[in-house]
Image: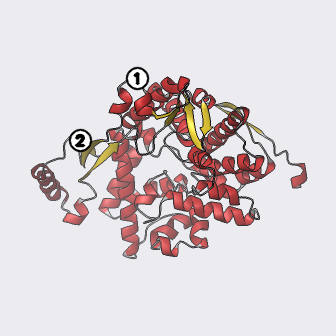
Amino acid sequence: MSSTKTNKLKILNDPVHGLISIPNSLIFDIIEHPFFQRLRRVTQMGMSNLVYPGANHTRYHHAIGCMHLMQKTIRGLQSKNVLISEDELNAVCIAILLHDIGHGAFSHALEHSIVNGISHEEISLKFMRALNKEFNGELDLAIEIFEGNYKRKFLCQLISSQLDIDRLDYLQRDSFYTGVTEGNISAERIITMMNVVDDELVLEQKSIYSVEKFVIARRLMYWQVYLHKTGVVAENILVNILKRAKELASQKKDVFGSRALRYFLYNEISPSNFSKTTLNNFAKLDDYDVLSAIKEWTHHEDFILSSLAKMIIDRKLLKIEIQEKPFTEVYINKLKTKYKKELGLTDTELEYFVFGDRISNQAYNTDKPIIIFTKKGKLIDLAKASDQLNVQVLTKKVSKYYICYPK
């Protein structure tokens, strides 16, 4: 069918925001691009569906939701006489649409195992630059905003700050799909209360309770969902599976995988050699490659790889203990000695089964404050504007320590 006949102003039905319209043909073409379509096969929440069975939504859902909220936000600011051109509106919508395009399979696991030293933000930028070439420079402004280099600071803040569009969508979406109502914020209300003063993104005073609820919701979602102990242990096992597979591949052993996955297992990928070929292979890699490989690896002759793979497939995970204070050396060594003997492993091999670290959560960071615009025209930090102590309390970084070992 010739492209002239395609209706590019489509409407999508989103369970969280309702009807979402695709604003123009450029954005439609970006969404239709294979790079973006890959996000349908990358879950938004990694292994969280082992805890919350409903958490199967994808990065694609989230990106489209962000674009929708961004459109609403800009239209709202324009109605308050903030001058924003159609080019800027388009660019900021593209920037938020593509902000997560560099996420690997299962969201964060690849970053810590088979693609080293390069973050998903950097990969997102590589995708944006590649798309920009294809679209003859039409993404120039979007990239400038995404990188935080655009002269109008508030547009960059809408992409990345403590109260950005990304967070407004994922808190509401993840709360909806997990069924954890504590995370349910009113993104609509917060967006309606946004304004721009001296090129800074601010929130009008009457939004203060909604913003407080947003900060608290974020804290609760972190402890209850994103850092849930079962999710933490599953994510760690997944990282260890990929690390082990890469280790075996580096020893020239045969490790099953799709073409894209084998590329990353059998090649050392770093920022210096992340080429166009690497990007194209990355664009073909998603949750399906990783999961089908893990299913196959349950039969691998390597004891470590097959044991870890079975844990994920059968959901028979390692035991995890979490506490406020670090675990003592004595306790850690006792566990290591016990399982080293039981499993007959070397010290380095044992690290796949007995390991620990810490998890941290800071709901509100005063270094990059959310600014409240008072009725008297003053600009103050949310932590000072709030008449409740809770926001002040939430500025403290809370850490917990965990250790994982076989049951």
Query: In the depicted view, which residue is nearer to us: 364 or 96?
Result: 364
Q: Nearer the viewer, mark 1 or mark 2?
A: 1
Q: Is residue 95 visible?
A: yes
Query: In the depicted view, which residue is nearer to us: 335 or 193?
Result: 193
- Position of residue 86 measured from the top left corner of the image (x, y, whole percent): 77, 46
| Vertical arrangement, residue 63 with respect to residue 291, above or below | above
Residue at horizontal 76 percent and vertical 53 percent from the top: 29
Could you tell whether 67 is left or right of 236 in the image? right
Query: In the depicted view, which residue is nearer to us: 147 or 204?
Result: 204
Could you tell whether 259 is left or right of 88 in the image? left
Q: Earlier in the sequence, mark 1 or mark 2?
A: 2
Q: Given the image, on which type of amino acid does mark 1 rest?
A: Asp
- The colouring scheme, among rainbow, by chain, secondary structure or one colour, is secondary structure
Q: Circle 2 sits on which residue?
A: 321
- Distance from disc 1 to disc 2, alpha carbons, whole Å, reads 37 Å
- Position of residue 127 measured from the top left corner of the image (x, y, whole percent): 62, 61
- Position of residue 50 measured from the top left corner of the image (x, y, whole percent): 42, 39
- Position of residue 164 measured from the top left corner of the image (x, y, whole percent): 55, 41
Residue at horizontal 49 percent and vertical 56 percent from the top: 290
Q: Given the image, on which type of amino acid does mark 2 rest?
A: Glu
Residue at horizontal 46 percent and vertical 71 percent from the top: 270
Q: Is residue 317 visible?
A: no
Residue at horizontal 44 percent and vertical 30 percent from the top: 217
- As helix, strand or loop, the secondary structure at mark 2 comes to strand
Could you tell whether 89 is left or right of 395 in the image? right
Mark 2 Cα shell of 10 Å, populated few (<14), some (14-19), many (≥20): some
Q: Which mark is drawn over residue 387?
A: 1
- As helix, strand or loop, the secondary structure at mark 1 comes to loop
